[in-house]
Amino acid sequence: MNKISSVNDFVIKFANVNGSGSASANQMFAKGVFRSGIPVSPKNIFPSNIQGLPTWFEVRVNEKGYLGRREGIDIAVAMNPQSYGQDIAELKEGGYLIYDSSWKRDFGRDDINILEIPLTKLCVQEFTNPKQRLLFKNLGYVGLLASILEMDKDIYISLIEEQFKGKEKLIEPNIKALEIGHKYAEENFKDLCGIKVKKSNKTEGLILTSGNDAAGLGCVYGGATVCAWYPITPSTSLAESFEKYSEKFRVEIATEKNKFAFIQAEDELAAMGMTIGANWNGARGFTATSGPGVSLMSEFIGLAYFAEVPAVLFNVQRGGPSTGMPTRTQQSDILSSAYASHGDTKHIMLIPSNPKECFDFAIEAFDLAERYQTPVIVLLDLDLGMNDWSSKEFEWDDLREYDRGKVLSKNDLDEVEEFGRYLDVDGDGVPYRTYPGTHPQKGAYFTRGTSHDEYARYTEDGVKNAEVLSRLTKKFQTASSTVPAPIFNQEESSSSIGVIYFGSTDCSMQEALDDLEDQNINVDAMRIRSFPFNLEVWEFIEEHDLLFIVEQNRDGQMRTLLMAEGGIIPDKLVSILCFDGQPITASFITSKINAHISGTPSVAAS
Amino acid sequence: MTYIVKPKNHHPLLERNELGLTRRDYEGAVSTLCAGCGHDSISSAIVEACFQLSIESYKVAKLSGIGCSSKAPAYFLNQSHGFNSVHGRMPSVATGAAMANHELLYIGVSGDGDSASIGIGQFIHCARRQLNMTYIVENNGTYGLTKGQFSATNDLESKSKYGDENLFPSIDLPSMAIQLGASFVARSFSGDRDQLVPLLKAAISHKGFSFLDIISPCVTFNNHNTSTKSYDYIREHNDSLSKPDFVPLGKEITANYEKGSTIEVPLHDGSLLSLEKLSDNYNPQDKIAAIKNIQESQRDNKVLTGLLYVDPNAKDLKEILNVSDTPLNKLASEDLCPGSDKLREINLSLK
């Protein structure tokens, strides 16, 4: 029998029944590997369902730090008979199948290693509580894995102790469940598995967290005080993260009152309206949503753009169109975010690639929104937002000050001879604003979405309206030099071929670039991090004859945006598109690039 | 010219309030609504109420949606910030604004299209959340700016100017507001200034969601003799519950009422709302009686006006959400940012 052998480099997939309590056990397995010093990227592949449907949890363990999804499963923990067929088919030759042999099965594959453990029977013997009998099967297989992978069991014992801190009664039975699986494996599977986890030091300076959690924390550090939101997968945990950290850090000690307002709105329209109202009144407010929410918010986004009210919106993208695949990932709201709303509108977008950037860009978004008095949309996706990533640690400089933009105080207004809300005093397209309640006689104005002049007065003078629209374009151009610059994989371009990518594609792209280098294919690469596009983006495109644009959508939306904004010739930009709802993989990218370079462009473009 | 500024010359003998201001100081731009529009009378009543209450205009935020009514905030309190938002969405903008700074006074002006149709969801949830604001619906039963379509508050029996039948029953916003938890609900008539001004003063002084449904005839599209929202119809069918008088904090009741005929409601800010009963079974603090009164008057083809319901002790949204007394927009960065030490702890917890 062939046996896969590897150290600190494998993919394990857990197949469970949704609602069976498996997620926290699977998460614990991943965290145990992380604590052993090896970067991990757990991915929860879940149904839009509360209980009963199949759910999967995939963990890639990779000492080199490649965290993108990889095809092919080395170890399958199949705990759901409903999905046995699919789960066994995905397993690589020489891979390992672990299943609950309380009910024995013949899987019809003789090229895999089958590890049978009668988990249900063992748990029925050891526990009397029916709920525990079911739940502890999960920790049972974690114990088994710790044994066959030769991991330090104590890591899991301390993880259990941390998880149940304050609920000490639960610690003992949980450890017992872990031991059941561990003991069984020690007795039955000694030296059976060729895959090992060996302690390493590759997680120094790293944390294990999700993009949504990081962005919610970033909102707290960014000084946001009003969060108005409506529940929608996959953005809900971002708002909840803000609430969690606010409750921890933003409660007045003396009064126990909140230095924040957390409002679950009646729908996304109201969430956006509240966000705009808060920002209009000088508080940093934000909302978190996904594609369908952005569609609903679009009218309001146009109002904030035209009336020049700051607003921060997190769009955690999911599979579209329409209701689409709510629990799968895509980058398919690039255009609907960039140009959200009717009429001529354009919005600043920030596109983070990892939790550290989600934290940083959340803070940056509030500064940019107030500096440019306009909506800023932070584009995450389900993979980045909801899954845990081995990310660089968060950083904060205590000397950093918020940029509250051009806001006139009472004293400023006393000195200003004439206040006009939309006067371009500085010539950068960014006017001065006042908060309501600032000055008894000066600075009041009427905010409106109707056409207006420099003094915010309603006008039907088309020339005046055109002047305002042109100034908004100027303002957008001003922003292009201050939004986050792209990241280059090389100091100087050296190839005629370039690759452009963004967002959660980053990890798979780094792996793909290494693979291409191994194949002696030299390409330059640039990661776009914002819109409007900076000068460096156009220079990179100028420097190359052929550019691959790697995206997780069907229509090549970033390519369209580059063509529209930069007048780039379509032939120069070749799309590499993954839109099956699964995170893009390195082998997908390299195979498409290889196919195109070797002369079959139609494959690469599809 | 689409925006007309009023000249600012005052007569030296104009009456002044406690702040030394005249009524002219509370006015706005020249109205561009039709001559005789009820909305202009309401704007004028708001000016009067704010003048009498000696309100500092710059501490007021005026918000609206879209429609004739929603233009009105431009025509009063020109020293206040205004926000003409999108159709039916004023309540959410007001909610966000009020959460950012609870110290301002929020006056929302909406219409029957804005609140009973496109924005009914926002109206409902704003009332339910007890946002501390005065929410005015200038109710004329018609879509004026789009030339006279029926709105959802138009009565079933009320025909259009061109004789069209109205096919659907009307939505009664005050009944809804009471049921949803609004803590101050009144109906009035733009043509009854004696009732409207004290009601506005009380609504503004009340802490919580103050809702005023003000019948405001549309002279161009809904003032004909088959309309139930015309000046003549309302004057004939107006069934006033009480004669309200608003007594600010520290002032004495001057009106001379018969003993037992008045109800006094002390408001949160120490002022007093005194109501001369015009109906025997009137008790504005009884929710069930309030809804019953409205239903009975509808049955009798009357338009019930006056203070319908009040709960002077209701909690507002700021209290419900336990938001700090320092307005959120006045918190300094050291109040907001937990700092690098705390971030190091967070990093450690994510290892």
Image (spheres, coloured by chain):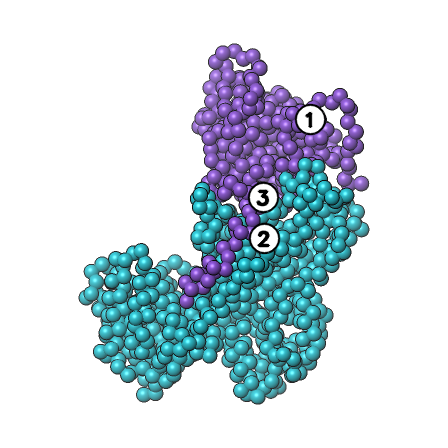
Chain colours: A cyan, B purple
Q: CA distance from mark 2 to mark 3?
A: 18 Å
In the picture, measured across the screen, residue A300 lies left or right of residue A38, that is: right
In the image, taking residue B285 as reference, residue A576 lies left or right, namely: right
Say which chain tag 3 marks: B
Amino acid at dot 2: Met
Residue A120 in the figure: left or right of residue A303: left
Considering only vertical position in the picture, is A225 above or below A2? above
Q: Secondary structure at mark 2?
A: helix
Mark 1 lies on residue: B20
Q: Secondary structure at mark 1?
A: loop
To which residue does mark 2 refer? Answer: A297
Q: Residues within 10 Å of mark 1 (few under 14, many from 20)?
A: few
Q: Which comes sooner in the sequence, label 3 or label 1?
A: 1
Residue at the image point whose x is 59% and y is 38% from the top? B104
Mark 3: amino acid: Ala
Q: Where is residue B40 drawn, in percent x and y?
A: 69, 30
Badge 2 and badge 3 in a common chain: no
Chain designation of label 1? B
Look at the image and tell me whether residue B144 can be seen. no
Give the residue at x 76% y 52%. A425
From the top left corner, tell me how far across and down residue A484 is, in percent: 62, 65
Chain letter, disc 2 residue:
A
Residue A253 visible, this angle: yes
Q: Nearer the viewer, residue A220 or A253?
A: A253
Residue A95 shown left or right of residue A406 in the figure: left
The residue furthest front is A399
Q: Residue at x 20, y 60 (%)?
A: A128
- Tell me the kind of residue under disc 1: Gly
Of badges 1 and 2, the one in the foreground is: 1
